[in-house]
Image (cartoon, helix red, strand yellow):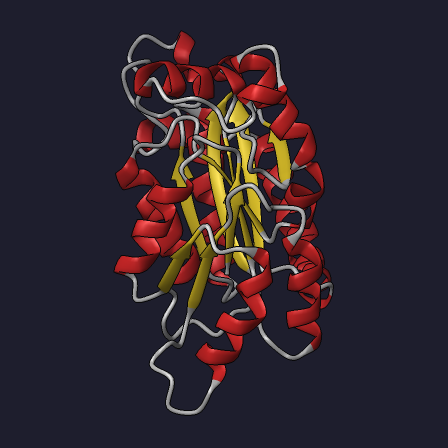
Amino acid sequence: MLITGLSGAGRSAAAAVLEDLGWYVIDNLPTSLVDTIVELASKPGSAIERLALVSGRQHVDLLPKVAALRADGHRVRIVFLDATTAELVKRYDSSRRKHPLDAEAQGLVEAIELERSLLDPVRDAADLVIDTTDLNIHQLRAKLIAAFDQAGNDQRLQIAIESFGYKYGLPLDADIIMDVRFLPNPHWEEELRPLTGHDPAVRDFVLERSHASHFLDQFEAMMVSLIPAYEAEGKSYLTIAMGCTGGRHRSVAVAEDLAARLRRRGIAVTTGHRDIGR
């Protein structure tokens, strides 16, 4: 696995989690040594079963290496860690560290945007993008465990359904985003406002509307038809995001209902709710 992404987005934290999961992790490995390390790890008798390489400044140079390794029969996955520029500025201000591209830009924001543009090809090639903007270390750990600690799960495509609030911004790691603000908002019902989409009263208020069930029927059917196509294209991870205004009521209820529908069809799904506690 190649762990890459924006500086300050959590590469080291992700590496520590994978190490805890039994991966052999090497940080800032020079590109020239990738073939050597993979060869050593692949030899009979090697104790290294799962190898994670954390990239530093040589992100783009590693893409040809990844292509070559895949051509040789290795299963290689790229995990890209992303975060908003505002959050990265906050983290750098807190740590008082210099950005690695600071000398090539005219300030911290410019350095972050320069790195973001340089890494666009890597992000596009990534198997899994994780937005760490609103994640603490425990939430990041949960996401990585859900993605990479699936012992006994033979399903090739890992599917995550998450809810979010539009007022807090779009999730950077979503492959498919659906807007469910067309549904009546429980926020305007005084007795429902303090509850969440996990509570039966909110769930019933949202899902018992005919257009809610019609939407979920149609979306479920679409996903059931698309999942085999994603798998045929070799996609390993799919994140579906459901958004409402605050990410507390409608999107949570819809995300959980969709997950339950897919599970009844034998499709393994994890759920997460980014803004439910705000």
Give the vertical position of 144 relative to 41 (above or below). above
**35 relative position to 139: left or right:** right
Quadrant in which the C terminus appears: top left
* Res. 169 in view: no
Foreground of the two, 278 or 6: 6
Q: Where is residue 81 in the image (x, y as percent from the top left)?
A: 50, 40
Q: Which residue is drawn at 51% across and 63% down?
A: 267
Q: Position of residue 23 (x, y in %)?
A: 35, 65
**262 relative position to 225: left or right:** left
**242 relative position to 214: left or right:** left
Q: Which residue is drawn at 60% across and 46% down?
A: 59
Foreground of the two, 274 or 81: 81
* Res. 62 in view: yes
Q: Residue at x 37, y 60 (%)?
A: 25
Give the vertical position of 93 relative to 76 (above or below). above
Foreground of the two, 222 or 246: 246
Give the vertical position of 60 relative to 25 (above or below). above
Q: In which quarter of the image is residue 35?
A: bottom right
Give the vertical position of 207 relative to 103 (above or below). below
Q: Where is residue 168 in the image (x, y as percent from the top left)?
A: 48, 16
Q: Where is residue 231 in the image (x, y as percent from the top left)?
A: 66, 65
Q: Which residue is drawn at 73% across and 62% down?
A: 229
Give the total number of marks visible in the rendering: 0
Furthest toward the bottom, the residue is: 44
